[in-house]
Amino acid sequence: MNLNTLLITTNSMKKNILLSTLALLIVTTIRAQINSNKDSIPMRLINLNEVVFSANKAEEKKSDIPYTIDVIKIKDLELNNSQTSADMITNTGNIMVQKSQGGAGSPIIRGFEANRVLMVIDGVRLNNAIYRAGHLQDVITVDNAMLERTEIIYGPSSVMYGSDALGGVMHFYTKKPVFGEDKINFKLNSYMRYSTANKEQTGHVDFNLGFKKLASLTSITYSDFDDLRTGYARTPNPDFGRNYYYAERKPDNLGDTMVYNTNPNIQKNSGYSQTDVMEKLLYKANDNINIGLNMQYSTSSTIDRYDRLQEYSGSTLKYAEWYYGPQNRLFASLYSTIKLTGKLFDNLRIAATYQDIDQSRISRKFNNSKKTSQIENVKVYSFNADFRKKVKEKHELSYGLEALQNNVTSKATSVNILTNAETPSATRYPDGGSTMITTAAYFTHSWEINEQLILSDGLRYSYNILSSDFVDTTFYPFPFKSATQKNGALNGNMGLIIMPEKSVRFNILGSTGYRSPNIDDMTKVFESVGGNIIIPNEKLKPEYAYNIEAGFSIMAFEDKIKFEGNYYYTLLKNAIVTKNAQYQGKDSIYYSGAMSRVQSAQNADEAYLQGVYGAIVSDLSDYVSFKTSLTYTFGQYYQELTPTTNNPNHDTIVPLDHIPPMFGQTSLFFHLKKFESQVYARYSAAKELKDYSPGGEDNLSQATPSGMPGWVTFNVKTAYHLTRHFTVNLGVENLFDTHYRVFGSGISAPGRNIMVTVRYKI
């Protein structure tokens, strides 16, 4: 027997022993619980009367809504025990999340990512004027420990939520303060967690103080993550994802050196820390009027851009430093909810919100003394008014107004690390400041025609104004001092629910979505990259998504098994892409000591996406449930080419970026009075080289020469309720220590990760 065979055999034996041990432990626990807990309350996955809030910003039965919606409840949050909100979203099994570094997470919904997916927290949009088309890590600034539930709407949702909701909406709902009656209502929830893959240490506490008229909820979470260890088992790419060298500065500033990593499975420079704080106050003016204050603050350490730090220039690392500065998000919202049966509305929610976001990028080439910092600040002021009215018994109306203003400031400096001499540098956005103003009005209607038919429809009109000013033209020698852009967008949707009988449901939906050009689209264009100079384009128009989808849900075997599926087709018009352009009739200009190709952001391409989703959910018994789901998306766009004799139409069809390979998840749930468990497999097909977009954002350089390999992981999460107050969570992710990298990612996923959490509640 050779060494490779021995290693494979030994590894297989370890896998079998580990799997058998875990299976025996779970089965033994379940048997003991069933025998000792005959009064356990059944917890079912199939809920015919499940309520959602996000579709029309009001409480509605999920079965009455034509959209596909995932709901993550607090029980799911506690059992899944995710490190970040990005990981929490992954646990749905229906969303793939891209990562470029340890502190990352960019959800992909139906082939849309970053600024084409909308994030909302407590009714307020988080997307701001500098959300880019690449990968975004902003979702990790939402602390999943302070969440009560999360709802994910799939597909264009711009009628209710406005710009950016092309792929869908992730709506995060934080916990609410609870009033007291005759005595103070004090509640405490806390936990401590340790995870082995990145030596995570997380501590959380939240507590409620409730009086008759006033209630307070305070939440604090701190997490520290060390460098991430990836999986050991690699086949058939033994070197893929190994971190052999990393950069360090020699003593006394004598230059940079490449240090050999003694454990190449440890992804050096991937650790970071984060602190999240929330304070909510709620005042009950009377039985019909509540006034609340919602304050949130998230801050991180510096976060190294792992994929950039693994780039090479020849045989030498390209960068000695490349990191994001502390990412700070301050959120303050003053809101009121009013219940008043009148002619105009039954329910009203108004909110005035302020957000302050700091972001920065710092980089230095290997053995180069020049360190460049680009620092951005965004201040967002918003106002929302959402009305709800029920007309007779069959019609429900939702309508509202929204106004937002984004103010963007951008600074940049270069520092010589040897002399500390500081010089100006090119800013990421115009140095004179930029503003984006949005106003909108919407109206939606739901009509329960009869018990078998429900019709939904809606319209929204939005108007955007963008302006940017340039003060220092040293780096951008163009004969203009400002750029301004205005546009309007009209969106609509119409959906029909058909229920020929109680156990059968069909949905048909036509919807549109849009994304208005933002400051990043219009003014980041002054960034010179690889011999290209990108100039402004004030004539940009909104991107539009035209979507049609159809789905079904069938209950069988006395409502113990549910089959569901969905097909959608989305056409993206006026897609904003960077393409070659001209400046004063020239396709190249002299810039920064060299001739540079002129480019600009343009509405040039048309793209289409289509996909299918299928799932089977079953409550096998009062104690055991099963769910499996599979998602497949396909997308292409028309790429403009130089005309030739064989191609007079100037274009060709190529793969669209941000399209994940087929992926899914299969889970088995055990739920008893004191014991809960989820045993699941998560899997992804391969993404072959030919399926990558030729000019996309999918980090092909971070894959293998043939593309991104497929993978499967096996995982176990458990929760044992020792008493009413104490719970212990044990979990093992990536049970067999498989090395894999999620599509589009620049960092490999965790290897075997053992998680231990102790929770205390009163």
Image: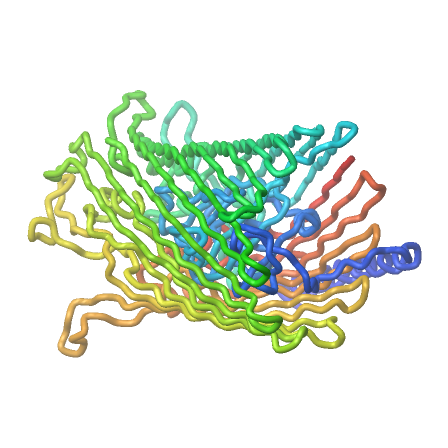
At 15% from the left and 35% from the top, the residue drawn is 481
Left or right of residue 261, residue 540 in this image: left
**Residue 460 in the image, given as x and y percentages of width and height:** 38, 55
Q: Nearer the viewer, residue 659 or 626?
A: 626
- Most foreground residue, 232 or 42: 42
Question: Does residue 508 sit above or below 415 in this rendering?
Answer: below
Q: Is residue 728 above or below residue 157?
A: above
**Is 118 left or right of 202, judged from the image as shown?**
left
Q: Quadrant of residue 606?
A: bottom left
Q: Could you tell me which residue is drawn at 70 percent across and 64 percent down? A: 46
Residue 430 shows up from this direction: yes
Label total for image: 0
Percent position (x, y) of residue 732? 69, 52
Asked if residue 268 can be seen in this view, the reply is no
Counting from the top left corner in percent of width and height, residue 369 is at 31, 30
- The residue under the point 32% across, 69% down is 654
State which quarter of the image contains the N terminus: bottom right
Residue in the foreground of this view, choosing between 480 and 701: 480
Residue 590, compared with residue 69, is above or below; it is above
Q: Quadrant of the C terminus?
A: top right
Query: Residue 434: where, in percent of width, then height?
Result: 28, 36
State the residue lying farthest toward the left.
585
Camera-nearest residue between 144 and 407: 407
> Does 105 sit above or below residue 609?
above
